[in-house]
Amino acid sequence: MLETRDILETIEMIRNENLDIRTVTMGISLLDCIDSDIDVACEKVYEKITRLAKNLVPVCDDIEKELGIPIINKRISVTPIAMIAAACRSKDVVKFAITLEKAARAVGVNFIGGYSALVQKGFTSGDRELIESIPEALSITDHICSSVNIGSTKAGLNMDAIALMGHTIKKTAELTQDRQCIGAAKLVVFCNAPDDNPFMAGAFHGVGEPDCEINVGVSGPGVVRAALSASKDLDLSGVADLIKRTAFKITRMGQLVALKASERLGVPFGIVDLSLAPTPAVGDSVANILEEIGLEQCGACGTTACLAMLNDAVKKGGVMASSHVGGLSGAFIPVTEDAGMIAAARSGALTLEKLEAMTAVCSVGLDMINIPGDTPDEVISAIIADEAAIGMVNCKTTAVRVIPAIGKTVGEELSFGGLLGSGPIMPVNTYSPLKFISRGGRIPAPMHSLKN
């Protein structure tokens, strides 16, 4: 039974601590839209998305009003488009991007994710064409997000794909230079990508998922920070327990919204992703949580240890609150989307090397990092390889979303607006990895992948 105290506490979290449902994402399988004629396939894709998602935004708006809980984004994820394009005689894959954009506008969602390819072990028909089309697709659309999975613990790392993605990211930034290189902010490169992630830019609907489902991503770093601020004398065991109990409350709210959306839309409930997803709003910051624990500024020695404790406590609290936890689940550290991270990067306390170390213990990876526009393609590829290696060896999801700031250099800034925020251009080690990247082939899977 809900007590008055619990209700008042939730109201306080929403009003003053930036608690929200970051996204309700409808996953839609497009496997039954496959056709050898690309125009027919596009017609099927548009029809299915608009039919299944026509009530997504109105239902979320109604739930938001009924419960008083902000739902910031309504999104769609679809089957990786490279799989659909593989069957088409025409290789003009951008037609699918245009179709997805048209469908997004028709149903009113913020983003559609799934302009994606899964190439961890090699390229199949359609994969290379899709990857090569990404720069154009993201430059001519506003609502499309793209991802490429280039490695896994089971398969190792596809270095040919990693080399290709370094070039793809740079070209995507160049084609959107007049819009703060925004295209690269909608493109993420994964190792161990999950099939049920509701967060952009990496969301896609995996082939093992049902025909249609609802996945919800919660937020709430401001709530965790506020709870720690009010409890200053705890030792670290007490801090971990407080974070765990707070994550439980946040996740329960997410599950409530997920179940209501599932029931009203008539599709299965998939998962709750219990990630702490920050925003550029002051106080709604993962970095500020680490500073509340005791760091002078995020990036100081001890940052990785604090983040490890935070991520573990969030997961422990969340899995007690929902029977279906999935996606990424933990703490996000996107630089431009987190007010504390932005401040730390500007001051020099937070470096690219420290961020890489932090990714070994958090949910995602090197996320929303602005780098100089003249960074060579092979250096971008090597950044991806380093981050993917952390994911492969540690059996976890890692990702890279870097934005080459074309025409700009260290000391300048990019500003994207909204949840994508803004931030400084961070220095990159440019000693050349060209020979390493040019070797191609695959980095073999680690020994501990052999678990059968």
Image: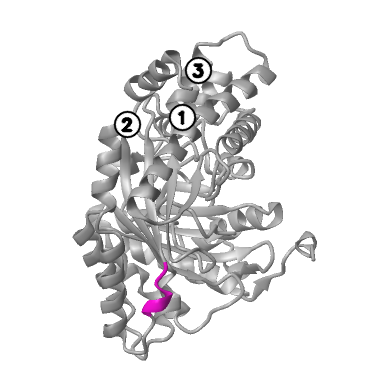
> Tag 1: residue type?
Pro
Q: Based on the picture, tell me whether residue 283 belongs to the magenta stretch.
A: no
- Which circle's residue, 1 or 3, is located before the other in the chain? 1
Question: Which of the marked residues, 1 or 2, is nearer the chain's N terminus?
Answer: 2
Mark 2 or mark 3, which has the lower sequence index?
Answer: 2
| Res 308 quadrant in image | top right
Can residue 417 be seen? Answer: no
Q: Residue furthest front?
A: 1
Look at the magenta stretch and give its main secondary structure: helix
Q: CA distance from mark 2 to mark 3?
A: 22 Å
Q: How many marks?
A: 3
- Is the residue 227 above or below the residue 263 in the image? above
Q: Residue at x 43, y 37 (%)?
A: 256
Identity of the residue drawn at 49% across and 60% down: 189
In the image, the segment drawn in magenta is 29-33
Residue 76 numbered mark, or none: none
Q: Position of residue 44 (x, y in %)?
A: 30, 77
Is 6 above or below relative to 194? Answer: above
Quadrant showing the C terminus: bottom right
Residue at x 24% of width, y 65% of height: 103
Query: Please, what is the three-letter code of the amino acid marked with disc 2?
Result: Leu
- Measured as percent of width and height from the top left, residue 336 is found at 39, 40
Q: Residue 67's mark?
A: 2
- In this view of the protein, which residue sits in the foreground, 105 or 256? 256
> Which amino acid lies under the numbered mark 3 shown in the image of this protein?
Ala
Query: In this figure, which residue is indicated by the disc labeled 1?
Result: 221
Residue under circle 3? 227
Rounded to the nearest angstrom, the CA distance separating label 1 from label 3 is: 10 Å
The kind of secondary structure element at disc 1 is helix
- Label 2 packing within 10 angstroms: few (<14), some (14-19), many (20+): few
